[in-house]
Image: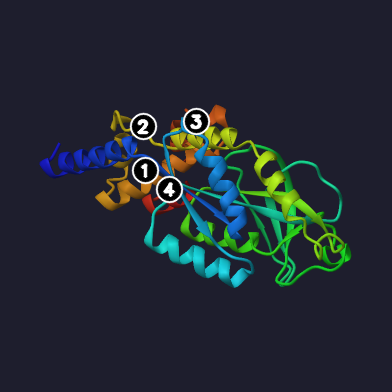
Amino acid sequence: MEFEDQFEILLIQILNHTNYYKMKKILFTAATSWELKIIKQEIKKLKNHKIKADFLLLWIWNYSTIINLQEVLLNQKYNFIVNIWVCGYSEKYQKSIQIWRIKNLANNKELIVPSFIKITDLESIACSEKIIYSPDDIWEEKFVDMESYWVELICTKFEIPRIILKIPVDKIWEETKNFDFIKAKKLLAENIDYNKLLEEISKYLEKSKVDTTSMLSLEKYQNYYNMSFAEKLIFEKLYNKYIILVEEEWWDKFEEFFEKNKNLSKKDFIKKI
């Protein structure tokens, strides 16, 4: 093996080894200061998780969300984003919900939120640019907020794993105009299992880390396509996603994927991953 190739592999190992022991950074976001205060209090009660928690106030309305979240992500790197705040409902719901689909009422577009982890019931939500006065305004949806579409859109652009959690608090419009802050704070503190949330995030981040104790498993594929240093880093990132996002029983079957597709060009093979 050429010295240059050995140096590249060693550098990759050093970079990944450093990331392995690096404390994971999680960004918690909310729309209002009182929500963020409750979340911060609950997270700080938990001391057994090896994470660094940052907290970001996004403020209400979509434009504030876009500007504030994007500005932070342009300057900081996070391993995971947790988006929590209250939402409106048309049908009574007693638990917290995890969002898997978001319908934008302004442009009729929708986004599917990947379930990197799951801690509660999966539900769809409408996202509005204005206050909703009638359940009829959210079409077939049972829940509504004003920011989730833009949080998901930005996280997608930055390729950051995330979870969007909502606490249904106010019934459209009768409770919205007389919002009960005491009730909302209580539900926000009690209706999310914050310990389970951090446990599941930690498990995900542990699994999503490519095994760098030995580079031999990846060297085979990298050498087959004669990958450059930059291509090797891209390949590792894609391989990492592959073994996590496909179903569990397929984690050890990348070799099968490789054998079926190794006739592709390097560009097409990397693209297919």
User: Which residue: 28% across, 36% down?
Assistant: 17
First reached walking from the N terminus: tag 4 or tag 2: 2
Local packing at callout 2 (Cα closer than 10 Å; few below 14, some 14-19, many 20+) is some
In the image, 244 versus 124, the foreground residue is 124
User: Which residue: 50% across, 30% down?
Assistant: 251
x and y percent of residue 22 in the render? 33, 39
How far separated are the C-alphas under marks 1 and 4? 13 Å
Q: Residue beneath label 1, please?
A: 236
x and y percent of residue 24 in the render? 40, 41
First reached walking from the N terminus: tag 2 or tag 1: 2
In the image, 195 versus 3, the foreground residue is 195
How far separated are the C-alphas under marks 4 and 2? 21 Å
First reached walking from the N terminus: tag 4 or tag 3: 3
Residue type highlighted by circle 1: Glu
How far separated are the C-alphas under marks 4 and 3? 18 Å
Residue type highlighted by circle 4: Phe
Q: Secondary structure at mark 4?
A: helix
What is the number of the mark on residue 251?
A: 3
Q: Secondary structure at mark 2?
A: loop
Q: Which-is-in-front pick, marks 2 and 3? A: 2
Residue type highlighted by circle 2: Asp
Local packing at callout 1 (Cα closer than 10 Å; few below 14, some 14-19, many 20+) is some
What is the number of the mark on residue 134?
A: none
x and y percent of residue 9 in the render? 22, 39
Q: Residue beneath label 4, please?
A: 269
In this image, 39 relative to 102: left or right?
left
